[in-house]
Image (cartoon, rainbow, N blue to C red):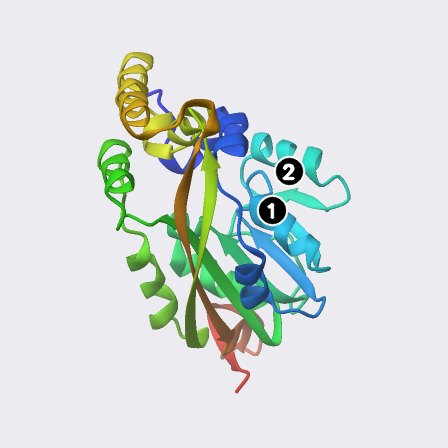
Amino acid sequence: MSDQPSPARAFGSVADAYDRGRPGYPAEAATWLVGAEPTTVLEIGAGTGKLTEALVALGHDVHATDPDDAMLARLRTRLPDVPTSVASAEQLPAADASYDVVVVGQAFHWFDHDVALPEIARVLRPGGQLALVWNKRDEQIPWVRKLGRIIGNPDRQESVEPLHTSAYFDGVEDASFRHWQTIDRTSVQDLVVSRSNVAVLDDEARRAKLAEVLALYDDYGRGMDGMQLPYVASCFRASVAARPEAATTTEPSGKSAEADDVLLIDFS
């Protein structure tokens, strides 16, 4: 059995690099995802608080969750007034119908969707929404495309498909917002180290990967003046259509028993 962490659980070991190296989210994207009027938000996979910060700035009441306490520790430092819980998407620390919006930044692809989507529907109020966002590098620019080839660029768009096919959500909408992150020779290394596929490498392989990235930066960069790394925030949202509820059946003997299945409570 490998002693390396799985990619989905590798971020805690590089939480500081993640916090320094990853881009934030533009206010326009956060507004589209959650709305301009203050509302109650449950954030799943909040990490170090990159998206949380944008949501709080808009006045939303956010409860941030993440399965890795090392990541949340950074969030608590940045946003000490935001309540946090160590929790996964498959087992949320919330009562039924208790939030207006569930938002997920850069994490939906890690979920067990068969379990997580009904769980998310459970905690949403009627008419509530699930909102997803991924920051994607804009690889139309040659040097950004080369960076992607070095550090890996898995296509996360296909991860939206479970939302399109889910019985619990409907009316999927999408929007995109361009923004830029200023990087320098130091922060580009943090960006690379914070990636899950790099975090699980051994020390020698990680050093080799960083050497490739620094060689690229030195070819294209401006030293301490840094560079503008372009991103597109790809956003999706859908309304809750049904909420699971435990079914109670009556056995022929007249005893009540909890059914193994769930009922779909239609909100439409």
Q: Position of residue 206 (x, y in %)?
A: 32, 19
Identify the residue shown where x is 39% and y is 58%.
113
What amino acid is found at the position of numbered circle 1 in the picture? Answer: Thr
Would residue 79 be found to the left or right of residue 208 on screen?
right
Question: Is 59 or 70 nearer to us in this picture?
Answer: 59
Query: If you read the primary sequence from the N terminus, does the residue marked by circle 1 or circle 2 appear first?
Result: 1
Quarter assignment of residue 124: bottom right
Element at label 1 = strand
Quarter of the figure with the N terminus: top left
Camera sees residue 233: yes
Identify the residue shown where x is 32% and y is 52%.
156
- Asked if the residue at tag 2 contacts the one at tag 1, i.e. Cβ–Cβ closer than 8 Å, the answer is no
Q: Position of residue 130 (x, y in %)?
A: 52, 66
Q: Is residue 109 above or below residue 152?
A: below
Would residue 205 be found to the left or right of residue 79 on screen?
left
Quarter assignment of residue 36: bottom right
What amino acid is found at the position of numbered circle 2 in the picture? Answer: Leu
Identify the residue shown where x is 32% and y is 32%.
197
Res 75 label: 2
What residue is shown with label 1? 65
Query: Which of the two discs, 1 and 2, sits closer to the camera?
Result: 2
Q: Is residue 78 above or below residue 28?
A: above
The Cα–Cα distance between marks 1 and 2, rounded to whole angstroms, is 10 Å
Q: Position of residue 164 (x, y in %)?
A: 35, 71
Element at label 2 = helix
Question: Furthest-right residue in view?
Answer: 81
